[in-house]
Amino acid sequence: MCLSCFLRSQFGSPSGLFGSLFVAPFLNATNMAFIRTSVELLGLKPDDRVLDIGFGGGYSLLALAERIPNGQVGGVDHSRDMVDAAASLIRARKLQARIRVRWGNVVKLPFAARTFDKVFTVNTIYYWPDLSLGLREITRVLKPGGRLMVGFRSPASLRLVTLAWDNFKRYEPQEVAAAMRNVGFRLLRVEHPTLSQTPDNLVLMGEYKKRSPR
């Protein structure tokens, strides 16, 4: 396997010794500030039920649980190794009653309909097999009036690093906003949560309004 293909595979679904020892800690370190800012923007309530899609190294699970002491965090990741690592981390922190993780795919989430008040995902949409299908599946597990927070990096900031990566989609904010609206989200805000306000880290927040049947 070429180096570029290997890196794309690992960042999309960390696995094995390399994924556990290098990729997961790297994802936690590089995404930490972005995750924490995004969690704050989500407007969490103490008893919310929140789904974290693509939790990777697991830092986002802990950041969410910290903000909802009476709530529940559900996590889903496409990497079985990351699910196992997160489960070990949760046990070590004695958070099994508040955080539960499962293996799965965004287009077929392993949760019942209308389970969550909020859905959170950072730096995952590039790897989704289909943005629209993923968003539509999120509306299934999200309660009407619930919120979706999508965090991602601008195409300009990703292009040089990921230029040769296959099955990796870079999105402009207007593309993501349009896809969210198409499945029933009312866009609440678009943020650039960086000190310089440059279009690098992007956050789109939407509120789900279930459509009436025609």
Image: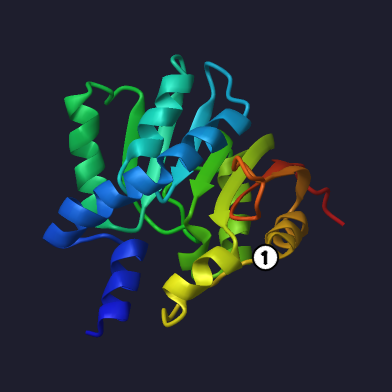
Q: Nearer the viewer, residue 21 or 116?
A: 21
Count of residue discs: 1
Q: Quadrant of the N terminus?
A: bottom left
Q: Residue at x 37, y 55 (%)?
A: 104
**Residue 144: quarter of image:** top right
Q: Is residue 115 visible?
A: no
Q: Residue at x 33, y 34 (%)?
A: 100
Residue under label 1 = 172
Q: Position of residue 174 (x, y in %)?
A: 74, 62
Question: Quick one: which residue is furthest to the right in this view?
Answer: 214
Q: Is residue 109 visible?
A: yes
Q: Residues within 10 Å of mark 1 (few under 14, many from 20)?
A: some
Please, what secondary structure does the residue beneath circle 1 have? loop
Q: Residue at x 48, y 20 (%)?
A: 68
Q: Residue at x 28, y 65 (%)?
A: 10
Look at the picture and state if 98 lies above or below 105: above
**Residue 170: quarter of image:** bottom right
Q: Position of residue 11 (x, y in %)?
A: 34, 63
Specify whether 46 is left or right of 164: right
Q: Position of residue 8 (x, y in %)?
A: 35, 71
Specify whether 189 is left or right of 136: right
Q: Position of residue 19 (x, y in %)?
A: 21, 58
Q: Quadrant of the C terminus?
A: bottom right
